[in-house]
Amino acid sequence: MQNRTGKRLTGPQVILLGFLVMILIGALLLCLPIATKDRQATPFIDSLFTAVSAGCVTGLIVKDTQTSWSLFGQIVIIVLIQIGGMGVITMTTFFSMLTGKNIGIRSRAAMQEAVSAPNIGGIAKLTGFIVKGTILFEGIGAVLVMPVLIRDFGVAKGIWYSVFMSISAFCNAGFDLMGSTGPCSSLTYYADNPVINIVFMFLILTGGLGFLTWADIKTYGLKFKRYSTQSKVILTSEIFLILIPAIFFFLREFSDVPMKARILESLFCAVSPRTAGFNTIDYNDFSGAGIALTVILMLIGGAPGSTAGGMKITTVAVLWAAMISVFKREDSPALFRRRIGYDVIQSAIAVFLLDLHLFLIGSVAISVIEDLPLIQTIFECASAVATVGLTMGITSSLGAASKLILIFIMYGGRVGGLTLVFAATGRTNAIHDKYPLDHMAVG
């Protein structure tokens, strides 16, 4: 693929352009009268916001999905979620394989970039594995929740709701069709239902583990020692990031809730912020500490090369390892007896600071523009940059300027801050003469 100057597009540029094209097509389709239940054309800003939120698998909404969008509109949204969750490059590569087209070296390189694969070899096989695994998990999820949803909404709606929400959960999108139980109610109606809670948590975690972690599990089974260092970091971090927050929520936020609901809500509140966007409780009822912990979980997110957003588990793990190595006065940080390269540490710092700047600047800007409490805008912008979709209920009331800020943050959060920068700088690999070394005190 070439740009208008005749130069070939880089991998980051292809990813950036692919998401832009998908979002614009989705936004135009959602503008059509057929996309809404009242058959009225939707303002472009609202269609664009919805398309960005769906394509970037975020879940923030300005219109309730079930009560505002028609079946056609809901289909557009779920297609955007599916493509956005698996990745535009993954989908185009897979369809090229289906039609028998040869996958060129540049397409393979773009695919490697999209799924954070360590090397270009076996990319075509990995693509097929990703698509098949996605369909399998989404199908299992839909079948498991179908009896509950058919019971509550009838056969036709129950089947459609099951398929839609299973895809949304696996892709960590957070869009739901529960509007008939209350506007923007998400899963609050099922707060104490073990089937809905357990299945959705399973889908969220599976989608957020990362495609390369799946591959390790498939190849080595329970032989944890043979997993890659990345998979080891992801799996051990997942356990920590579920159990510690769940215990906190159990003790602090749900002390007056019946035991079954207390356990389910505590676990769900630990899992969903990473980065699914479904909720079984109203976050306006959370304490300040609960909100702060949820924001942290949202910013961390899931694994690289997964359907989840956020800074990524590995980014945070590398930063922690670097900090500990400084405390110990070691030459270089290590995880699972493997040294971490300086380039990886640099990338982790860049990702951390980019996301931090995006969400803090957006939070302050929206707070000033809308005259809203900073805690609410911090929650909303953390949800946007980490493509989570959890909300304190302010999104639908925001003005056009604030919506545009969230649109940019969601887009940047999904394609990745580094991808945005690399796409903007093109193929520049400037090699500068080394400057004289100097010392600067920090800390």
Image (cartoon, rainbow, N blue to C red):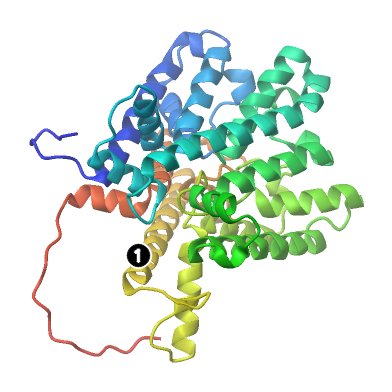
Give the residue type at disc 1: Ser
Q: Specify the quadrant of the image occupied by residue 84.
A: top left
Q: Is residue 161 above or below residue 123?
A: above
Which quarter of the rendered picture does the N terminus lie within?
A: top left
Side of 179 relative to 421 (left or right): right
Q: Is residue 270 left or right of residue 356?
A: right
Give the crowd class for mark 1: few <14, some 14-19, many >=20 residues within 10 Å: some
Q: Give above or below for 171 relative to 208.
A: above
Q: Residue at x 37, y 71 (%)?
A: 345
Q: Is residue 329 visible?
A: yes
Q: Which residue is mark 1?
A: 347
Name the residue nearer the viewer: 186 or 92.
92
Q: Quadrant of the C terminus?
A: bottom left
The spot of residue 334 in percent (x, y) is 46, 78
The x and y percentages for residue 165 are 64, 30
Please tell me whether mark 1 sits on a helix, a strand or a loop. Answer: helix
Q: Is residue 171 left or right of residue 259?
A: left
- Image height of 85 relative to 251, above or below: above
Q: Residue at x 50, y 66 (%)?
A: 229
In x, y percent, where is residue 199?
73, 39
